[in-house]
Amino acid sequence: MTDSDITGAPAGALDGIRVVDLTRILAGPFCTLLLADMGADVIKVEPPAGDPVRGQGAMVEGYSWYFAQFNRNKKSVVLDLYTDEGKADLTRLLETADVVVENYRPGVFAKMGFSAERLAEINPRLICASVNGYGSSGPYVDRPAFDFIAQAMSGFMAVNGDPDGPPSRAAPPISDLIAGLYCAFGVVSALQARHTTGRGQQVESSLTGGLISMMAYLSAEYFATGANPTRTGNNHPIVAPYGLFQAADGEIAVAPSNDTFVERFLRVLGLEGLLREPDFADNAKRMANRDALNARINAVTREKPVDHWIDAINKAGCPAGRVMGLDEVFTDPQVLAQEMVIQSEREGRTPIRMTGFPVKLSQTPAALRQPPPELGEHTEQIITFVRNATKSH
Amino acid sequence: MTDSDITGAPAGALDGIRVVDLTRILAGPFCTLLLADMGADVIKVEPPAGDPVRGQGAMVEGYSWYFAQFNRNKKSVVLDLYTDEGKADLTRLLETADVVVENYRPGVFAKMGFSAERLAEINPRLICASVNGYGSSGPYVDRPAFDFIAQAMSGFMAVNGDPDGPPSRAAPPISDLIAGLYCAFGVVSALQARHTTGRGQQVESSLTGGLISMMAYLSAEYFATGANPTRTGNNHPIVAPYGLFQAADGEIAVAPSNDTFVERFLRVLGLEGLLREPDFADNAKRMANRDALNARINAVTREKPVDHWIDAINKAGCPAGRVMGLDEVFTDPQVLAQEMVIQSEREGRTPIRMTGFPVKLSQTPAALRQPPPELGEHTEQIITFVRNATKSH
């Protein structure tokens, strides 16, 4: 059933792995997207009304490109899991699957009749993955979850933004995406364990837990010192110069993370003499006089365009880049060379543009194997198959 | 050699997988941390001067807790890869390994004598993973990379921040961490492929590519409409009310993502009558009159403390949370229940506090198996072992 759908695509790393996908909106679908891109046979089970994302975001020819981005390479099966027939069909699907992924609130899937114990009865080799807001135990387990709240409760928002301004969120739903990626990593790790144990297990990630794990040196500093990190906007908390500078036609981001890089940067500007002035002689002094330092630098950088500076500063070995809007990102020669913009072709429709694959494997690469599915496009094919397979038991 | 080091820890999902880790600083070490937490035997190969992170961040009893956070569960071996002896020892290590991870600039590892072809000769089952700034081909391949620059060049910075303010970075080095996590996912996917193909392959992720893949609906909207998304600070671009509100003793984050949630939220405040006023009757009107709406809401929320509102709004089924500093995060009962703060015990030293494991597996859980290593702590044990193993060939 799987192979006939794949025409001309290379073998994937997760070929032969079947995933039953009960997720909707974002964190769960991102997890199963990553598995599908790697070659897994992902069967997206949707309620009769479909994943709500089908109706969200800008539509092209009646189709949500937001839905397409998150659901390429998947098949769509409609089941009404409020009915006995729907539950029976789901049970049959789970018998044939390696992985099930759900992002219900903790406890809901069990109430629907699919507790961990029942799932292990149905299929002891099944890996049962869950993405949720706060984890499946603890005092907040029943709270509704949402990316913005996870950003607030993980400490992430408190460290972002200007020192004089409010805590600031990141615009992308970063906690959903990180939780989805962690869950995909957990699922593939559980596949590896199954080669040894012969059994499936439960895998779980959460929006808040995932983002907390990304606090990096900010959390390490807090644990070591007991002091909360302060917000420093685009400035580095302990290095100057660093940040955004003004070129003739826009801004440049420059990140000289230590004295060697600072000297390389200032040399490009013809400002290496600054390092012999008492106010700027070492990092501590440059931090204390950051405004004056930045003014001296901006006076030079303003004279020439962004392209000139980016090229010259990088050639000198100091990290620098343009602050890009998405229009620049998706026409950038490096981004295109890395195939981070791809097109899903579909007969009679405008090809759907979407972001490409962030993990490159040389022999079993991620690839476009299926266009994003119409709601229920594969219901008949797949449900007929599993019903017949069960009969022949 | 591996088993004797593990005392009382449960079996890990990646038990028996040996990883040679040539990475330093952040993205690469985060990748190998995730593999080590899952049970892989990670051998961190350090130059005689050690990973620079050993000297960074706040020290406790002379030990960097930043280093500890990123290098727990690993062993440390010192090799000077500028010498023939060091290269010979590395070759012996690679013969016994399943995975090698490096985060040199593209081409550097090949120049050191370890091209993809040579690595496949040394060990055809070896999975060779690389984390870098821009990918290993394309016009920017030789540029030095850094998190701040990747945030600028991925479009991430351009969408974060207030509409009237500058593009804003996230304070944590989010592009490093996401690239490391993607690489770990790629490595474990390649392990799964190896069960079929019998061979290793190259795996790669990049700081910019990883962050681009997280632009989610912002990139989908750009592709569908051709328009750059605008910065909206903490406000939702298309929903009101939404964001931070003032309680008597702090701020609360509230995310009512559609009309149902808006009504639940306003009902808690006794403000459901607002929905019958012409200025606030639907989402479009509430967006147009957001300042007036927020003022009406803040007038009520200011009357009671954060705890009251968080509890009441969640009970009504609308996502809400406290904006937490790290001091609140790491004493929060849910965070503690999820074991997101753990301690690495070490004889004669203050236990090192660090963040816990963001992916939970029920049967082969992530666990603390080894304290973060001293520089070269395992050199003799491991290098003697592989030299003897080679002799006995």
Image: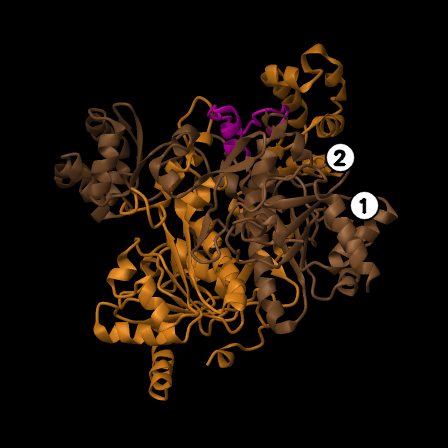
Chain colours: A orange, B brown
At horizontal 46% and vertical 69% (from top left) the residue drawn is A371
**Residue farthest along the right direction in this orientation:** B84
| Kind of residue at badge 2 | Ala
Same-chain status of marks 1 and 2: yes
Residue A270 found in image quarter: top right
Secondary structure mostly seen in the magenta stretch = loop
Query: What is the crowding at mark 1: few (fewer than 14 residues within 10 Å), some, or many (at least 20)?
Result: some
Q: Nearer the viewer, residue B260 or B365?
A: B365
| Label 2 element class | loop
Q: Give the mark nearer the N terminus: 1 vs 2.
A: 2
Q: Say whether residue B352 is magenta.
A: no
The residue where tag 1 is placed is B81
Tag 1–tag 2 contact (CB < 8 Å): no
Q: Position of residue A321 (x, y in %)?
A: 63, 39
At horizontal 17% and vertical 34% (from top left) the residue drawn is B269
Q: Position of residue A389 (x, y in %)?
A: 38, 84
| Kind of residue at badge 1 | Leu
| Label 1 element class | loop
Q: Measure how far apart labels 1 and 2 are at the Cα level.
A: 12 Å
User: Is residue A101 at all visible to an observer of this figure?
Assistant: yes
Question: Which dot marks residue B49?
Answer: 2
Relative placement, left or right, of A312 versus A167 is right
Pointer 2 chain:
B
Residue A277 found in image quarter: top right
The magenta span reads: A215-243
Relative placement, left or right, of B40 versus A48 is right
At horizontal 46% and vertical 30% (from top left) the residue drawn is A159
Instruction: Please determine whether, in this image, residue B323 is positioned above or below residue B358.
Output: above
